[in-house]
Amino acid sequence: MPETSHDIRTLNSLIASIIDSIDGYTESAEEAQNSRFAAMFTESARERRGVLAQLQAEVARLGGNPEDDGTTAAAAHRVFINLKSAVTGRDDQAIVNEVERGEDHLKEKWEDAAADPDLTPSTRAVIAQCYESVRKGHDQARDLKHSLQAS
């Protein structure tokens, strides 16, 4: 059986980021004033839960313990954003900007993992399959941000 510890660590890192993404979308849906944005963020969180389940299943298949918590950095970031919003007020443009910033980070992390030459082909295939959700979420957030800036 091939060594899987690197694959498991990489997948668990992606899992933590996906959990952060789910939390971010859930919070954004709750904060959004525009019901269309709230529905879009809720759907994105739902889609990411599917990615989470797929990644966790792969870690378990490899014999690892799937991550079930987000990153400490993301939790700290959310606390800061909540504090900032309490002081400055929160509008949909600010929420969309934060979502887009998070999606930029997630997309970069995913692309780095996909380019890792030390991953097994099966892990790389799972990452590539799940990347579709990441790419779609990134592009949607980017396009929404640009459309709001143009208004």
Image (cartoon, helix red, strand yellow):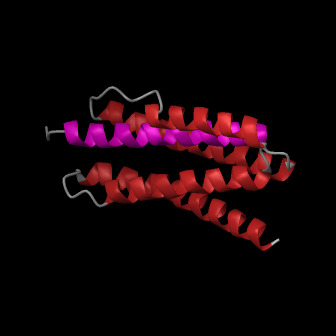
- In the current view of this chain or complex, which residue is farthest to the front? 87
Q: Which residue appears at 33% of the width and 26% of the height?
A: 65
Left or right: residue 108 versus residue 142 is left
Q: Image quarter for residue 64?
A: top left
Left or right: residue 94 versus residue 55 is right
Give above or below for 84 relative to 128.
above
Q: Residue 84 location in percent, x, y?
A: 67, 39
**Is 130 in front, or is 17?**
17
**Is 70 in front, or is 51?**
70
Q: Number of callouts in the render? A: 0
Q: Which residue appears at 69% of the width and 37% of the height?
A: 27
Magenta-highlighted residues: 5-31
Is residue 19 at all visible to an observer of this figure?
no
Q: Image quarter for residue 87?
A: top right
Q: Residue 49 location in percent, x, y?
A: 57, 38
Give above or below for 116 relative to 69.
below
Q: Which residue appears at 51% of the width and 58% of the height?
A: 104
Is 28 magenta? The answer is yes
**Is 122 in front, or is 47?**
47
Q: Which residue appears at 33% of the width and 53% of the height?
A: 113
**Is 148 in front, or is 121?**
148
